[in-house]
């Protein structure tokens, strides 16, 4: 006899497919292991006539009739589909969904979560390098030719203040310009103002120009001063060195504000906006997080990595960060604004749709299809199907779903009333 084998095979299929709970107009009611179904006709697509179904469910209050093929249409009167199959009655006792006793909920470890409305934030992890803020870099390049007589700042890494002397230089061109201006200022000629402007363009300070106008001696050397406060990053000058006009002698950078150049995959670009908050970590300070903001996205996608470079402005007032450090970056982006949010674990994947188990109170649950939106960090946006404040099953939803599917499969093999089993043939 093949029935036991067929029943066992279908039972195994129900166990393996327990995650794909059918979602239609009615749901299985289960009060625990071995409990009878609230309505057989409301759960299974049997092809009994509506009259027979009504007799079998005389104690049942019929709400409506659903399509026997699971299509999303209902009728409030008994009817048949275009293939002659009777619509299946749905009882009021079963329409509320699943029923699970408190004892059974405890054994399954059922927990709940509330649907909330808030912004859904997504964290994007990336890697990058700490670099100098190019907006805070100056190059010391004299505007005249000459020789370095005395190098006052002679090592990379030295800290300098704005206006601090860097080198004493000898420049015949600068000396001649000072002599001409001093003479014109002493004579009171109109050429004096033009010659003073020339000295400014050559890099002479206002104090030196005022001293010459008052009859001070022309200095044989001039001072090169720091154009900004910062750290000497490069030093190309040496004592006695000849330099032409425009020759770079030093490069000074302000390290109190740095950049981090991070690489982000192009699929995440729509989530990034200038001004978004960023957390940066470096190997030198484990557990320490440095706050920064996205300054801009560089306008090019790297062809080999399919990433875009993101420039992050970082405060370094303590001086702990150094250019060249490897950085781990976490960017906080807005995935969905003012959305209904629930943990992704509360959503069951059922065939070609997603469903949730909504708690109706007193051990009753409704299986409800939902439309998902953005997902981030273990949470998901529920675009359709639920309302704010509803309670969803967060854990053990799969176990409830699996148990319901198995019970439905077993019920399908229950013999009809009055049926007799044929005796087995003797070989």
Image (cartoon, grey):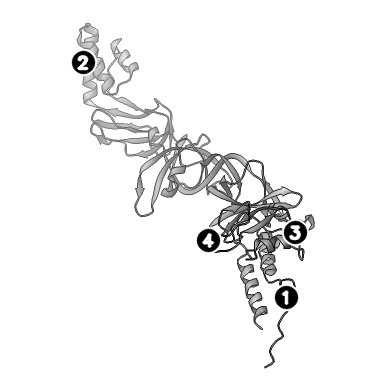
Gap between marks 4 and 2, in whole Å? 110 Å
The residue that mark 3 highlights is 58
The residue that mark 1 highlights is 419
Looking at marks 3 and 2 on the same chain, the residue that comes earlier in the sequence is marked by 3
Looking at marks 1 and 4 on the same chain, the residue that comes earlier in the sequence is marked by 4
Looking at marks 2 and 1 on the same chain, the residue that comes earlier in the sequence is marked by 2
The residue that mark 2 highlights is 180
Quadrant where the C terminus sits is: bottom right
The residue that mark 4 highlights is 82
- In which image quadrant can residue 85 be found? bottom right
- Secondary structure state at the residue bearing disc 4: loop
Gap between marks 2 and 1, in whole Å? 127 Å
- Secondary structure state at the residue bearing disc 3: loop
Q: Answer whether labels 3 and 4 touch (C-beta < 8 Å).
A: no
Q: Answer whether labels 1 and 3 touch (C-beta < 8 Å).
A: no
Gap between marks 3 and 4, in whole Å? 27 Å
Looking at marks 4 and 2 on the same chain, the residue that comes earlier in the sequence is marked by 4
Residue 84 rendering spot, x and y as whole percentages: 56, 64
Residue 404 rendering spot, x and y as whole percentages: 68, 62
Q: Is residue 381 visible?
A: yes
Residue at image position (27%, 18%) is 218
Gap between marks 1 and 4, in whole Å? 30 Å
- Secondary structure state at the residue bearing disc 1: loop
């Amino acid at each position: 006899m093949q029935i036991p084998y067929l029943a066992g095979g279908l039972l195994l299929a129900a166990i393996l497919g327990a995650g794909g709970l059918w979602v239609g107009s009615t749901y299985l009611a289960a009060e625990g292991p071995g409990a009878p179904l609230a309505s057989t006709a409301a759960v299974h697509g049997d092809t009994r006539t509506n009259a027979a179904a009504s007799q079998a469910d005389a104690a049942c209050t019929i709400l409506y009739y659903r399509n026997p093929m699971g299509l999303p249409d209902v009728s409030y009167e008994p009817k048949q589909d275009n293939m002659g199959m009777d619509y299946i009655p749905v009882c009021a006792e079963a329409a509320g969904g699943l029923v699970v006793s408190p004892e059974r909920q405890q054994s399954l470890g059922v927990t709940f979560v509330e649907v909330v409305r808030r912004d859904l934030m997504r964290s994007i992890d990336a890697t990058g390098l700490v670099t100098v803020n190019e907006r805070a870099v100056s190059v010391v390049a004299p505007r005249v030719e000459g020789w370095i007589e005395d190098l006052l700042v002679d090592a990379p890494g030295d800290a300098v203040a704005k206006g601090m002397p860097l080198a004493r230089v000898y420049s015949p061109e600068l000396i001649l310009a000072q002599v001409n201006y001093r003479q014109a200022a002493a004579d009171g000629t109109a050429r004096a103002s033009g010659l003073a402007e020339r000295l400014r363009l050559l890099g002479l300070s206002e104090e030196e120009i005022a001293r010459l106008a008052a009859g001070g001696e022309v200095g044989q050397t001039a001072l090169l001063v720091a154009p900004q406060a910062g750290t000497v990053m490069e030093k190309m000058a040496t004592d006695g060195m000849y330099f032409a006009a425009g020759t770079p002698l030093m490069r000074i950078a302000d390290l109190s504000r740095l950049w981090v150049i991070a690489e982000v995959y192009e699929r995440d670009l729509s989530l990034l906006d200038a001004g978004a908050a960023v957390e940066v970590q470096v190997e030198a300070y484990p557990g320490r997080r440095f706050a920064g903001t996205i300054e801009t996205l560089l306008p090019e996608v790297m062809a080999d990595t399919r990433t875009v470079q993101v420039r992050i402005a970082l405060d370094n007032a303590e001086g702990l960060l150094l250019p060249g450090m490897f950085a781990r970056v976490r960017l906080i982006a807005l995935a969905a604004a003012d959305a209904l949010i629930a943990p992704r674990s509360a959503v069951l994947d059922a065939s070609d749709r997603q469903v949730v188990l909504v708690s109706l109170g007193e051990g009753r649950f409704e299986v409800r299809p939902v439309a998902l939106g953005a997902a981030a960090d273990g949470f998901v946006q529920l675009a359709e199907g639920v309302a704010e404040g509803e309670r969803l099953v967060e854990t053990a939803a799969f176990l409830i779903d699996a148990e319901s599917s198995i019970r439905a499969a077993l019920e399908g093999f229950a013999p009809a009333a009055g049926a007799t089993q044929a005796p087995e043939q003797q070989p």
